[in-house]
Image: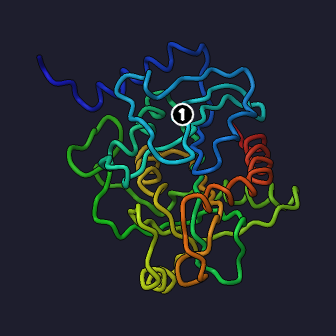
Amino acid sequence: MEEISFLEKVEQSAAFIKNKINYDVDIALVLGSGLGELANDIENQTIINYCDIPFFPHSTAPGHYGRLVIGDLGGKKIVCMQGRFHYYEGYDTKTVCYPIFVFNQLNIKKLILTNAAGCLRKDWNVGDLMIIKDHIKLVADNPLRGTNYEELGPRFFDMSKTYSSKMVSVAKNCAKELNIPIREGVYQFFSGPSFETAAEVRLATKLGADATGMSTVFEAIVASYFGMELLGISCLTNMATGISETILDENEVIEAGKKARPQFIELLKKVIIEWEI
């Protein structure tokens, strides 16, 4: 039997999802650790478990439900990922970004990536929300390494406008209207699953990073490849190693995400309402 290609797998996944709904989706939303409850606010829900979608990966990270919730939020049609895929789970980078390929196949061109991140700034606080204006990736791997799909995007592409400056402004204005304190900064990717060492945190700070995390960047690269309009927001769930003497663990991250959830949900709803389709 001839082995099915990556793009054929993507097409079959997208076709399965499309068969479950009778409308086009406006915005895709990826929810990070501890933030999955936002999907409960979606109306007229269609829920699809990842394990039911042909060729779709399975989420194993704590706080990730592993399903798509599709429906109405803020006057838009939304597909929400309750749980993403991480490099530290053992997936290769292309598999980590598999949903972004599927979203593109569904002709979704607007994407919100959220995450839980470690804070590198002593003058910021746990629970703050940070709009991502840029990122740093020192890990050599890249989800687009290997065969390029010319019908999808160019072999080489610019990354200077990965995070939409228009949506950064929209998010900042929404936060101001809601009286929600908001930060803006650079997110640096570390592979995990170990938290960063104090020396790595010092390096990230010197490189210009304001937060660190174990997700988002590979997805952002693929979104840029597809020319998607992208907004990234981090919930600063802990102070990074060396910034605080607290011993880090995953439960702290999830609990901090829960505490920040009400404001986070309020902001995302407002952003979605204001996003021009």
The residue at the far left in this view is 1
Quarter of the image for the C terminus: give it: top right
- Residue 74 rendering spot, x and y as whole percentages: 78, 35
Report crowding for label 1: few under 14, some 14 to 19, many 20 or more residues within 10 A (C-alpha): many
SS at mark 1 in the image: loop
Residue at image location 63% in from the left, 42% down from the top:
36
Residue at image location 54% in from the left, 64% down from the top:
249
The image's colour scheme reads: rainbow
Vertical position of residue 207 compared to residue 127: above or below = below
For residue 153, what is the image quadrant? top left
For residue 29, what is the image quadrant? top right
Number of numbered tags placed on the structure image: 1
- Residue 218 rendering spot, x and y as whole percentages: 41, 54
Q: Can residue 170 be seen in this view?
A: no
Residue at image location 70% in from the left, 70% down from the top:
126
Q: Which amino acid does label 1 sit on?
A: Ile
Vertical position of residue 53 compared to residue 156: above or below = above
Question: Label 1 belongs to which residue?
Answer: 108
For residue 253, side relative to residue 137 (left or right): right
- Residue 232 rendering spot, x and y as whole percentages: 59, 55
Q: Is residue 202 visible?
A: yes
Residue at image location 40% in from the left, 59% down from the top:
158
Vertical position of residue 20 compared to residue 50: above or below = above
Q: Nearer the viewer, residue 20 or 104?
A: 20
For residue 194, side relative to residue 248 (left or right): left
Quarter of the image for the N terminus: give it: top left
- Residue 184 rendering spot, x and y as whole percentages: 66, 69
For residue 170, side relative to residue 3 (left or right): right
